[in-house]
Amino acid sequence: MSESAIIIEDLVKKFEDVIAVDDVNLQVANGELFGLLGPNGAGKTTIINILCGLIKPTSGSAIIGGYDVQNEPMKVKELIGVCIQETAVYPYLTGAENVNLFGDLHVMDSETLKARRTMLFEKMGLTSEAKRRAGKYSGGMKRRLSLILALIHNPQIAFLDEPTVAMDPQSRHAVWDFIKDLKNEGKTIILTTHYMEEAEELCDRIGIIDHGKLIALGSPKVLISNNLVKNLEDVFIKLTGRKIREEV
């Protein structure tokens, strides 16, 4: 694997008359916790969907762990875990059954699956809920279960698309600690969030996307300093404006 876990070159994605991703170039280092921020409809989720092989770009390329996403999608999928924006759990299965299903899909052996499941349920505070149907979980609990499903196979690269949405402050901070642990294990993490304090707390570097373009790139401290403001939220507002956006 090269020094860059992710290499994006001249990436473009068009949907009919909308340019969702507009000539984006970006590299993310191995072991980096990278924040991808932007208003609703800016192109963040589209970029993640391209990187995960869920949709094809109109032009340009994306390399994950040395593999071309378009030409070697199965190699890429062996390396990544994805916690999508929409909560993705089977409501009629218990929490443990959901995890077992995903472990089986990744062809994990039973002992490894059991050990990973036990550890992740404990870290996510769901041990006592493991045998409860996921449909009975609160919104925050479902998000934590979605995180477990994304990471059960111990991927080297994790895409976390708004992982703490709908969580109470205690749960959010527990997930922050968990994400920090992942980074300390050497994982590469791409994080999208609308919580600017979350990005400021967790991310090594941040890229701000607006109208499909990468308009700012740097560490939280550098972005704050360069824009002569007090915090990352002020940076975000200064660069993207205050007008409410409609989701695209």
Image (cartoon, rainbow, N blue to C red):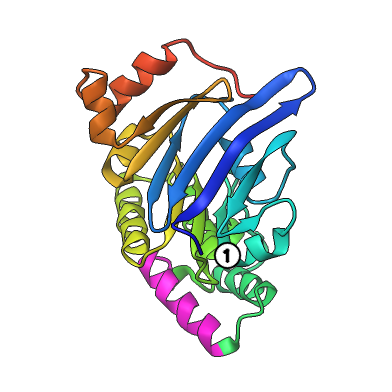
| 110 sits to left or right of 165 | right
Residue 127, given in percent of the width and then of the height, sits at 42, 72
Residue 20, given in percent of the width and then of the height, sits at 65, 26
Q: Is residue 80 above or below residue 104?
A: above
The outermost residue toward the bottom is 111
Residue 49, given in percent of the width and then of the height, sits at 65, 44
Q: Is residue 162 at least partly visible in the picture?
A: no
Q: Is residue 174 above or below residue 18?
A: below
Residue lying at 30% horizontally and 37% vertically, measured from the top left: 219
| 228 sits to left or right of 54 | left
Residue lying at 43% horizontally and 66% vertically, measured from the top left: 126
Q: Is residue 27 above or below residue 154?
A: above
Q: What is the magenta range? A: 111-128
Q: Amino acid at mark 1?
A: Leu
Magenta stretch mostly in which secondary structure?
helix
What quarter of the picture does the C terminus occupy?
top right
Q: Secondary structure at mark 1?
A: helix
Query: Which image quadrant for residue 94?
Result: bottom right
Q: Is residue 115 above or below residue 17?
A: below
Q: Which residue is mark 1?
A: 79
Query: Which image quadrant for residue 22?
Result: top right
Residue 234, given in percent of the width and then of the height, sits at 29, 20
